[in-house]
Image (cartoon, grey):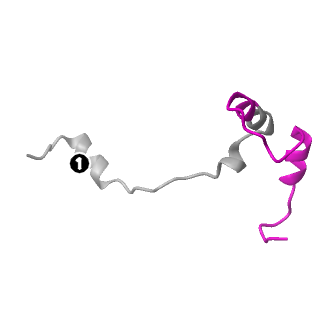
Amino acid sequence: MTNDHPLDQLIRKLPKAELHLHIEGSLEPEMMFALAERNEIVLPYASVEAVRAAYNFTDLQPA
């Protein structure tokens, strides 16, 4: 049984895209520390400033 409702037809015809994000690029350092503390996880950074310094780069090539 198919649903021929015009809205269903439109949705089927619309182009689709798979979206993703890298959490490191969207997570503020303060939130990173808050989540780590809440979940009892030790971060490899000593401070918010250390995280900011680690993410201060000019290209994506490995060092």
Q: Nearer the viewer, residue 14 or 24?
A: 24
x and y percent of residue 28 in the render? 76, 39
Q: Is residue 14 above or below residue 31?
A: below
Q: Quadrant of the C terminus?
A: bottom right
Q: Is residue 59 above or below residue 35?
A: below
Q: Residue at x 12, y 47 (%)?
A: 2
Question: Given the image, on which type of amino acid does mark 1 rest?
Answer: Gln
In reply to whether residue 21 is colored magenta, the answer given is no
Q: Residue furthest top?
A: 38
x and y percent of residue 26 in the render? 69, 45
Q: Is residue 1 left or right of residue 41?
A: left
Q: Nearer the viewer, residue 17 or 55?
A: 55
Q: Residue at x 67, y 32 (%)?
A: 39
Q: Which residue is mark 1?
A: 9
x and y percent of residue 34 in the render? 75, 30
Q: Is residue 49 above or below residue 38?
A: below
In reply to whether residue 59 is colored magenta, the answer given is yes
Q: How many marks?
A: 1
Q: Is residue 46 left or right of residue 25?
A: right
- Identify the main secondary structure in magenta: loop
Q: Residue at x 73, y 35 (%)?
A: 36
Q: Which residues are magenta?
A: 34-63
Q: Residue furthest left?
A: 1
